[in-house]
């Protein structure tokens, strides 16, 4: 079963990486249990591959949970991009997505919607 609700045109949606666009529901990755962190119902960053140091430092500084999973063939099939930044909203949809570690863009996004730390 695939959830087909998207909010790509919403003002809460900014960017894309791989086949995943901000506004899409976070895709499930077989074998990764990448939905487990969604139980927190908080803002969080997901990276499949290796999170760049700039993202790790920023997330630590604002207490934004950062979750990393190894890159796998299942991740590619889910449409995610290796090492990309996906900010997941509390509703499980992607709010902000970038192929590169755009810390300034992430900060502007969070500021725009009055989301401030600690976010955990």
Image (cartoon, helix red, strand yellow):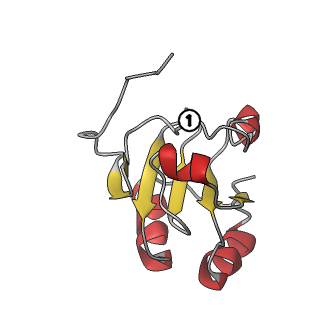
Q: Is residue 88 above or below residue 36?
A: below
Q: Is residue 72 above or below residue 78?
A: below
Decide if residue 10 is on the left or right side of residue 117. left
Q: Which residue is mark 1?
A: 92
Picture residue at 69% right of the left edge, 80% below the top: 57
Residue 87 in picture, x, y percent from top left: 53, 54
Task: Give the crowd class for mark 1: few <14, some 14-19, many >=20 residues within 10 Å.
Answer: many
Quadrant for residue 41, please give it.
Answer: top right
Q: Nearer the viewer, residue 41 or 25?
A: 25
Decide if residue 77 is on the left or right side of residue 17. right
Residue 96 in picture, x, y percent from top left: 43, 56
Residue 47 in picture, x, y percent from top left: 61, 61
Decide if residue 53 is on the left or right side of residue 40. left
Picture residue at 75% right of the left edge, 32% below the top: 39
Q: Nearer the viewer, residue 48 or 59?
A: 48
Residue situated furthest front in the rendering: 73
Picture residue at 64% right of the left edge, 56% below the top: 72
Residue 82 in picture, x, y percent from top left: 53, 65
Quadrant for residue 5, please give it.
Answer: top left
Decide if residue 18 is on the left or right side of residue 81. left
Q: Nearer the viewer, residue 74 or 93?
A: 74
Q: Is residue 41 above or below residue 113?
A: above
Residue situated furthest bottom in the rendering: 53
């Amino acid at each position: 079963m695939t959830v087909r609700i998207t909010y790509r045109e919403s003002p809460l949606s900014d960017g894309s990486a791989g086949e995943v666009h901000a506004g899409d529901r976070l895709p499930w990755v077989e074998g990764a249990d990448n939905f487990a962190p969604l139980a927190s119902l908080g803002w969080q960053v997901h990276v499949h591959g290796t999170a760049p140091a700039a993202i790790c430092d920023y997330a630590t500084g604002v207490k934004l949970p950062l979750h990393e999973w190894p890159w796998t063939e299942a991740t590619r099939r889910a449409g995610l991009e290796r090492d990309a930044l996906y900010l997941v909203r509390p509703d499980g949809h992607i709010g902000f997505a970038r192929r590169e570690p755009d810390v300034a863009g992430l900060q502007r996004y969070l500021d725009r919607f009055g989301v401030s730390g600690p976010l955990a």
